[in-house]
Amino acid sequence: MMRWMHLRFHAPLAAFGGEMIDAHGVIRNVPAQSMLTGLLANALGWTRAMRDEHQALQERIVFGVVWERDVAHSRMTDYQTAQLGKADRAWTTRGIPAERAGGAATYAGAHQRWRDYHADLRLAAVLRLDPADADPTLDTLAAALDRPARPLFIGRKSCLPSARIFAGWVADAADVRTALQAVAPTKASRLLAFWPEREGTDGAVRITTVTDERNWVSGLHGGGRRICEGSISSSRDEA
């Protein structure tokens, strides 16, 4: 039996980002492995320079999620415009301002982009670490989520949680589906859920590959995982 950390993702807006398509920031129905790594690292107060620590944490995370509401009605797109000039510079994570090139006609029109969001997010997750006895431990992560070193956000920096993220423990769950059933809303049934293929394919209606990992040493996104999509029902009879 294994112990799982129960995470609650409730927010007015959230973004589980997928692969960028030109100026369109798309989302998925499941958080990225790299997003959870960054969220936990942010709570711990880690810096970007701690690349090896980020990489090791990402490789240890095993998680599954279950939607507490109908995901079909949660999506919205934010249309954004900005009139940029050649003298407008942008800061980068490298600490060096990004210069702009091109002639005057390059800046005649407004810059446009589209960003997808999940509105009124209601999602539960269960998470364990493999191996469980390395640092940081689940207890360390739980304490950091309750007293984070920096403000936490769900995907994009504008997506602030509306509830406590750490929601308790699931003890003695043999697998991820059992743990998800334990945190699903009371008496709920046929809820959309996602979990790693390596945790078992029972109950899966679809198995897909997602590229949701990050090479924290190089700073580039890449690396695929196989995940299962299916439905689960709550194992709780009472609140």
Image (cartoon, helix red, strand yellow):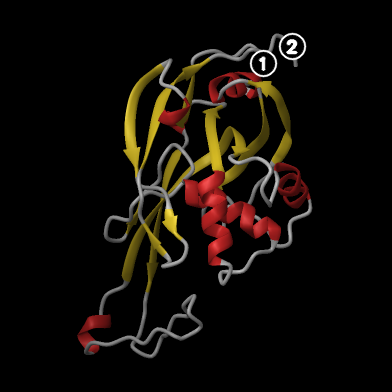
Count neighbours of disc 1 (C-alpha within 10 A) and say few if under 14, some if 14 to 19, many if 20 or more. some
Q: Quadrant of residue 183?
A: top right
Q: Position of residue 237 (x, y in %)?
A: 70, 9
Residue lying at 41% horizontally and 29% vertically, measured from the top left:
197
Q: Nearer the viewer, residue 57 or 79?
A: 57
- Calculate the distance from the C-alpha at mark 1 to the C-alpha at mark 2: 6 Å
Counting labels gives 2
The image shows residue 236 at horizontal and vertical percentages of: 68, 13
**Taking 140 as reference, is 65 left or right?**
left
- Quick check: can you spot residue 132? yes
Q: Find numbered disc 1 in the image and state the secondary structure of the residue it sits on.
A: loop
Q: Which residue is mark 1?
A: 186
Identify the residue at horizontal 27%, vertical 81% (top origin): 107
Q: Position of residue 19 (x, y in %)?
A: 33, 52
Tag 1–tag 2 contact (CB < 8 Å): yes
For badge 1, the amino acid type reads: Thr
Q: Tell me the number on the disc at residue 238.
A: 2
